[in-house]
Image: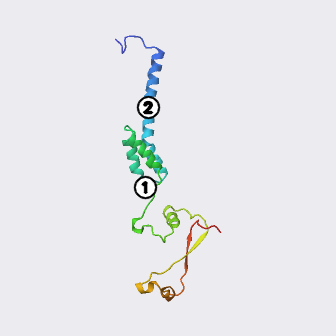
Amino acid sequence: MGFVDWKLTGYDYLTFAFLLLLIIVFFYVIIQQGSLPGKIAERRNHPHAEAVKITGWIGLFTVFPWIHAIIWSMHEATLVDVRTLPDTDIDLEAQKASVYGVPMPAGPAKKVVARSMPESPEEEGSDASDTRDGPQEPVESNSPDKLT
C-alpha cells in the first residue's frame, strides 16, 4: 500500500512543488512585512528604532499596530533637550542645525537690539538704565523676515 490510492504522475509532483514554493513565499513575505517598520526606522536614524521594530513585529497579525509602526518609522523625530527649553532669544535654526548636524540655511541677517531690564520700578520711566552700562551691541539673528 502506498501513500495514496492512485499512482502519482508528473503533474502531482509539480503540484506539490508549487505548494511548497507557495508556502516558502508566504513566510518570506510575512518576515519582510514584519521587519519593514524596523528597517525604515534604522535607515532614518530614528531614536526609537528598537521600539518601532518591536511594534512592527507585534502588530503584524493585528494590522493596526503595524500601520502605526510604519507611520512612526516615517515620522521625523525631534530631539528636545529639556535642560535648555527654547527661549525667545535663542536662534531656533541654529539650535536645530546643532542637533541634526546640518549647516544653517543662508538667509539675510536681522539685527535685534538687546535691552536690559530695569532693576527697580523707579527706573522704568527713565532711560538711565540703557546708558548706564554703555552702548550695547546688537544681536544678530538668521531670520527670513526681511530680504536685503
Q: In this view of the protein, which residue sits in the foreground, 143 or 1?
A: 143
First reached walking from the N terminus: tag 2 or tag 1:
2
Q: Secondary structure at mark 1?
A: loop
Q: Residue at x 55, y 71 (%)?
A: 141
Residue designated by label 2:
26
- Whether the residues at callouts 2 and 1 have beta carbons within 8 Å, the answer is no
The structure residue drawn at horizontal position 46% and vertical position 84%, both measured from the top left corner, is: 125
Q: Residue furthest front?
A: 125
The type of residue carrying mark 2 is Phe
Q: Residue at x 57, y 68 (%)?
A: 142
Quarter in which the N terminus is drawn: top left
Local packing at callout 1 (Cα closer than 10 Å; few below 14, some 14-19, many 20+) is some
The residue carrying mark 1 is 47
| 2 or 1: mark nearer the eye | 1
In the image, residue 115 sits, relative to residue 110, either above or below, namely: below
| Quarter of the figure with the C terminus | bottom right
Outermost residue toward the left? 1
